[in-house]
Amino acid sequence: MENLTAILPELWQATKETLTMLAIGLTLSGLFGGALGIFLFLWRREKLLYSPAAYFIVGGIVNIVRSFPFVILMIAVGPLARTLTGTTIGPVAASVPLAIAGIAYFARLVELSLSDVPKGVIEAAQALGASTRDIVFKVLLVEARSSLVLGFTSLSVSYLSYSAAAGIIGGGGIGDLAIRYGYYRFQTDVMLITVIGLVLFVQLVQASGSHISRKIDKR
């Protein structure tokens, strides 16, 4: 208990740093990853924005990013993080590799979610003269909304583990606290409390995402 009492200020700071990484990373991943996933779906569907070349090139880049172990990706994009944020340490800098990994990850989740929309629904919208824009916003995203929420929930859970790993290169956050005190200083109680906190947060995120998904699923 003495160890826990001593690190309470740092624990609060680490929590804020983790939330900062999650807020920046998830926002960018949701916006850019979602848009990229929509285009990946449209590029491989005839009568929409069919473009095998674009799908092959962009899809290949997405696969390359997803194949990188996150720790390696953090090191590889260090120069980019420095260019964008002026530093390679801290939660804002760590948000750069987090966003890159999240955009690639969420793009595939969005593509898969949209692929589950029945072809008949899309063809019916086309027969009624709906534009590609209308099909995306009034058909695809509406029909796939429950699956998209579950995908974003999965991304959020993965982000939490990524943000913990960011502590290895000075990204800060709860992971950094666990490494410095729980691992290097052999303070098992600190390691235990951080693990419990992360587990509870994951359970909260997963339960919230599943609840929202069920609420908006009208099938």
Image (cartoon, helix red, strand yellow):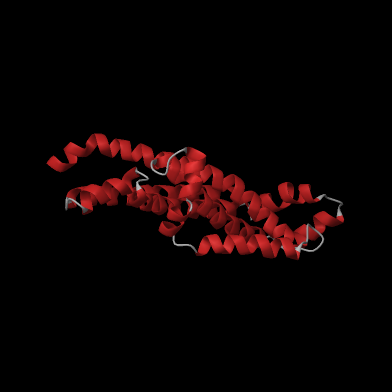
Q: Could you tell me which quadrant the N terminus lies in?
A: top left
* Residue at the outermost left position: 2
Vertical relation: 133 (above or below) 219: above
**Residue 163: horizontal and vertical position, in percent?**
40, 49
| Foreground pick, 152 / 160 | 160
Q: Residue furthest top?
A: 9
Position of 76 with respect to 148 (left or right) is: left
Q: Going 62% across and 59% down the picture, which residue do you hit?
A: 113
Q: Quadrant of the C terminus?
A: bottom right
Q: Nearer the viewer, residue 29 or 204?
A: 29
Q: Is residue 66 left or right of residue 183?
A: right
Residue 2 at what x, y percent from top left?
12, 40
Residue 61 placement: quadrant: bottom right
**Residue at 83% of width from left, 56% of height from top?**
126
Q: Relative to 124, is 176 on the left or the right?
A: left
User: Front-most of 40 and 192?
Assistant: 40
Q: Is residue 60 visible?
A: yes
User: Where in the figure is residue 158, as x and y percent of width and height?
Assistant: 44, 55
Residue 156 screen position, x and y as percent: 47, 50
- Name the residue located 74 percent from the left edge and 65 percent from the top edge: 52
Q: Residue at x 73, y 58 (%)?
A: 42
Number of marks in the image?
A: 0
Tell me if I can see residue 44 in this picture.
no
Image side of residue 212 versus residue 143, left or right: left
